[in-house]
Image (cartoon, grey):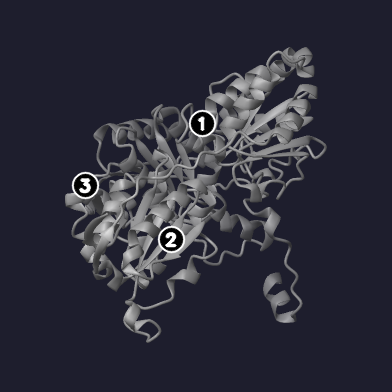
Amino acid sequence: MVRMSASEAFVETLVAQGVTDVFGIVGSAYMEALDIFEPAGIKFWSVAHEQNAAHMADGYSRVSNRHGVCIGQNGPGITNFVTAIAAAFWAHSPVVAITPQAGSMGEGLGGFQETDQMPIFSKITKYQVEVKRFERIAELTHRAFTLAMAERGPVQINIPRDYFYGETDYEIREPMVIERSSGGSMGLAAAARLLAEARFPVLMAGGGVVMGGGQAEALELAELLGAPAICSYLHNDALPASHDLACGPIGYQGSKAAMRIVSQADVVLALGTRLGPFGTLPQYGIEYWPDDARIIQVDSDHRTLGLVKPAEVVIHGDAGAVAAELTRRLQGRELVSAATRDDRMARVRAEKEAWRRELDAISSSQDVPMAPRTALRELELAMPENAMVTTDIGNICSVANSYLSFDRPNSMFAAMMFGNCGYAYPTAMGAKVAAPERPAVAYVGDGAWGMSLAEVLTCVRENIPVVACVFNNRQWGAEKRNQIDFYDDRYVGTMLENPSFAAIGRAMGAEGVVVEKPGEVGDALRAAVESDRPTVLEIQVSQELGEPFRRDALQMPVRLLEKYAKYSSE
């Protein structure tokens, strides 16, 4: 026990948890603690908007597999966190949102910058706690940090601003690590039996494989079974793309090879994935999900087991640890799949080659302005091997799922099922802070860029050399596609008139480059990465649109009122 102030105890707890970076905007509500961040070895990264601070914390945590921490002024500063914390929730990122609250003595009086901050985050955090005595600030902060990692998601520490003051004796605890298991014996035995009897087993790797560092264990199991391996939607880095068994991702604009292979499965081993509904929808007109396949689902969150797809066997455990245990149980055992291994491998090679040829064919246009797929292919070919790529939501960024492949985990970051615009750039910033030795590249549409371009100021000021690839097609493409398919080309709110984003970047102190021709794309990306400067690549692309993004959520409109029918006919 050491006597210190509440702010000192709070900061010492951050230090004990290994926190070296905090993202936010300065505020009087926590200035007593902020004042000692620097002498405690904590860098405060000041941003242009608090939403982007939380996105930076998300990217930081996903790359480093550590906590990402954000903080802001009570009231409006904290409500600005909401969108990004929701994105972190669906990405299972251990973000710690520190939310200073209006003073306890003025609670409920409607004072300056007061709002009830706990209900706002109640559905998008794994754990919430409010400090109600300054004497407990260290204890409760320690608890929140523990649960962020244990339950893999954002947590909230709500601290009335007057509780950063006060003096007492504090115990600063070391981090508590809660180890995940390799599953229960009954589930493991049933899973081993199903896999041993499978004729065409397929392994599906999700975010749990990446977060748990279980890639090697998953591959060892796949190799033992001779099982083709696919990635779940937006987890293209779950398996090394160069591996012979790797077939790529399923989901929107994913790999047709992966979809055609999994459609033949009689047993699917879903490792570290909740089998989300959007990530298994039909694509390219292919009803690929094998409804008759027997599913083994493994996840560290027991609430996801059997939630979306009926699973014959469920295992509550760490994806990598379970894969290692299943390998141990299957070694030396007679496997039905062994007899058909060569045939499966031949199918995998054929499907991967067919998909590669198809992508080549639809990505080779030399038109100006560029077809989006041409731009994406040129970026893919020039991308550094160790790059971290973040993708925003939208038509072109979503089509990038066809092209993004990685051999290293913790390399691809998307807004996952929350699907918010403005995600990619600040997330890439946080990733770059966590791993400054790796290139960070953000894919952003021109609509979404309007939500995050102010952070170019932050990148210049703080020397965060992120490359923003901004696809300028002067439209909200994903929603425009809906207006084409369902509303007779009536464009409301989807057409954009843009300035030069490259010129704006230069005005902010960054590099700004306009890319107009396919042959310029690769050189521009390589030069931007090599410059080690914040760079905006404004890539001029055509208004060609990809497959419908949300066909599952729309139906043909019915106009019951005569005046609307008249408008529609005109």
Q: Nearer the viewer, residue 260 or 53?
A: 53
Q: Earlier in the sequence, mark 2 or mark 1?
A: 2
Is residue 350 visible to the viewer in this orientation of the structure? no
Quadrant including the C terminus = bottom right
Question: Looking at the picture, which amino acid does disc 3 mark?
Answer: Gly
Mark 1 or mark 3, whichever is nearer to me? 3
Label 3 Cα neighbours within 10 Å, binned few <14 / some 14-19 / many ≥20: some
- Left or right of residue 361, residue 227 in this image: right
Q: Is residue 126 rendered to the left or right of residue 382?
A: right
- Gap in angstroms between the C-alphas marked 2 and 1: 34 Å
Would residue 252 be found to the left or right of residue 56 on screen?
Answer: right
Instruction: For mark 2, give the secondary structure.
Output: strand
Front of the two marks 2 and 1:
2
Residue drawn at x 62%, y 31% as measured from the top left: 322
Residue 520 percent across, percent down from the top left:
37, 33
Q: Which residue is mark 2?
A: 156
Is residue 132 or residue 214 the one in the foreground? 132
N-term-proximal mark, 3 vs 2: 3
| Residue occupying the point 26% across, 66% down | 30
Q: CA distance from mark 3 to mark 2?
A: 23 Å
Residue 480 to residue 187: above or below: below
Residue lying furthest bottom: 109
Foreground residue among 152 and 256:
152
Which of the marked residues, 1 or 3, is nearer the chain's N terminus?
Answer: 3
Dot 3: what SS?
loop
Is disc 1 placed on a helix, strand or loop? Answer: loop
Picture disc at residue 41: 3
In the rendered view of the protein, which quadrant contains the N terminus? Answer: bottom left
Residue drawn at point x = 74 percent, y = 73 percent: 559
Report if the CB atoms under discs 1 and 3 are less than 8 Å apart: no
